[in-house]
Amino acid sequence: MELKDRISILKGDITKVAADAIVNAANSSLMGGGGVDGAIHRAGGKRILEECMEIVNIRGKCKTGEAVITSAGDLPVRYVIHTVGPVWTGGKSGENEQLSNCYINSLDLAVKHGIESIAFPNISTGVYHFPRAEAAEIAFRTVRDFLEKNETITNVYFVCFDEENYALYNEIYNRAFAYSE
Ligand code: ADP
């Protein structure tokens, strides 16, 4: 399968996406919150939070850039991968690399669990205020580089909740694959 067919840009609510796994833009406590985190816990039910609490009890909080995996409760997916995006503080505190690590660590976990299709929200671009254009470039480049080296993941969906992100991702996608058939 060609790279361009393994990446899709979707618009809407990630809790409605059917894939093997969806990724949650969590915070380090893994205790739920607002935005996409709140939507995932609301739609998935309490099982997800119980597993998150177990993980924190065993290994402590989830650091920025890291990822952990739980089951998905009532969601139409098998797993939820929770990753903690960086809070934007101007770009000089390693935010770019941390954001990239969110995608890499989520994909690594996906591979370990035999996940073939995975949906990402636009991590850190809500209350964490990462500039959207830069976040989209980092997300796309990181996923693309990963897929070039990995055969097992067949589909990555970038699920954009707002128009601006949707337009940005489409532009990047079209630019990346402009000269392929
Ligand atoms: P962060 O703390 O990482 O910034 P947010 O949840 O505030 O996390 O925002 C991350 C992105 O998720 C934002 O672009 C926001 O618009 C988007 N978002 C919010 N709700 C949903 C949802 N139900 N499905 C997909 N994306 C969502």
Image (spheres, rainbow, N blue to C red):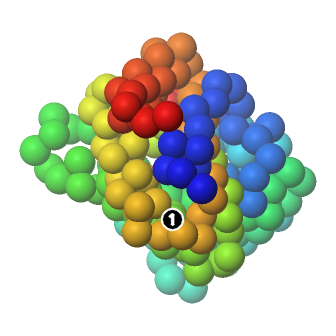
Residue at image position (37%, 31%) is 179
Q: Quadrant of residue 151?
A: bottom right
Q: Quadrant of residue 56?
A: bottom right
Q: Is residue 61 left or right of residue 179?
A: right
Residue 138, visible in the rendered structure: yes
Kindly give the residue lying farthest to the left in the view shown: 92
Q: Quadrant of residue 175?
A: top left
Name the residue nearer the viewer: 47 or 78: 78
Kindly give the residue lying farthest to the front in the view shown: 181
Point out the image quarter for the N terminus: bottom right
Name the residue nearer the viewer: 152 or 98: 152
Looking at the picture, how far across and down is residue 60, in whole percent? 48, 77
User: Label 1 amino acid?
Assistant: Leu
Looking at the picture, how far across and down is residue 23, in whole percent? 60, 53
Q: Quarter for ligand 1?
A: top right
Residue at image position (52%, 22%) is 166
In this figure, which residue is indicated by the disc labeled 1?
A: 107
Kindly give the residue lying farthest to the bottom in the view shown: 58
Looking at the picture, how far across and down is residue 128, in whole percent? 38, 36
Q: Is residue 142 left or right of residue 22?
A: left
Looking at the picture, how far across and down is residue 77, in whole percent? 80, 56
